[in-house]
Image: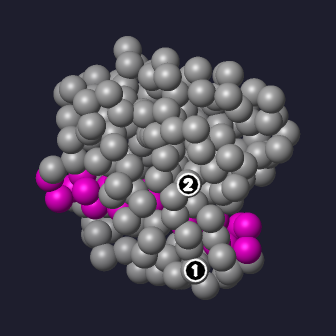
Amino acid sequence: MSRVLVLYDSKSGNVAKMAALVAEGANEVPDTEVRIRSVDEPEAVSDVLWCDGIAVGSPTNMGVLSWKMKRFWDEAMGEHWMQIDGKIGCAFSSAGGWGGGMELACQSILTVLMNFGFLVFGVTDYAANKMTLHYGAVVTKEPREEEATAACRLLGRRLAEWTAFHMHGRKDQHPSQKPNPRMPPG
């Protein structure tokens, strides 16, 4: 059984909505247990230790992750250095508008995860027409449009697939074994 954690900080509720969609996508992969936690919940630290794979979501704050998410990793997780090395990780973020730095925020989340030894990934296939997730799922405001909801679900599904493949040797879950109906022609 793969264990996936969706950990988020959400000031306006938009990233919390993304987190729910990421969890839905992870739940599409058989034999996956999914937990959703806010960085404000006391169980968050033990859930990071529990999981095989993690999706970390944050509002975009001046082009980087939120101060609460950064504080969580600096203060709450600092003493657990080396205990979470080798887990799978990915990122998602929301901002007020396009050009708000969401991809930079995802990169800052991925940088934090890499410093803790997480194996991070981007998604090469398309979630929708003109919608890729190279650095993670990004949306403006809340995920309402089909492209945005599809991106969040795809990120969660891919996290669960990579976790099943890398952590549990489930070769049938390798993403290349599954066709992508959204891939644009040629």
Q: Residue at x 83, y 44 (%)?
A: 83
Mark 1 and mark 2 residues within 8 Å of each other at the beta carbon: no
Q: Position of residue 8 (x, y in %)?
A: 45, 40
Tag 2 residue = 5
Does the magenta-highlighted stretch encompass residue 150?
yes
Q: Residues within 10 Å of mark 1 (few under 14, many from 20)?
A: few
Residue at the far front: name it: 42
Q: Residues within 10 Å of mark 2 (few under 14, many from 20)?
A: many
Q: Is residue 52 above or below residue 55?
A: below
Visible in this render: residue 115? yes
Relative horizontal placement of residue 43, taking residue 36 as reference (left or right): right
Q: Position of residue 177 (x, y in %)?
A: 54, 81
Q: Position of residue 64 (x, y in %)?
A: 45, 21
Q: Residue at x 68, y 47 (%)?
A: 46
Relative horizontal placement of residue 182, taking residue 25 as reference (left or right): left
Image quadrant where one finds the N terminus: bottom right
For the magenta stretch, what is the residue range?
145-168
> Element under label 2?
strand
Give the total of numbered labels.
2
Tag 1 residue = 31
Residue at the far right: name it: 82
Query: CA separation, marks 1 and 2?
Result: 14 Å
Give the mark nearer the N terminus: 1 vs 2: 2
Q: Main secondary structure of the magenta part?
A: helix
Q: Amino acid at mark 1?
A: Asp
Residue 176 found in image quarter: bottom right
Q: Amino acid at mark 2?
A: Leu
Does the magenta-highlighted stretch encompass residue 119?
no
Q: Is residue 178 above or below residue 23?
A: below
Instruction: Looking at the picture, tell me which residue is in the foreground, 125 or 80.
Output: 80
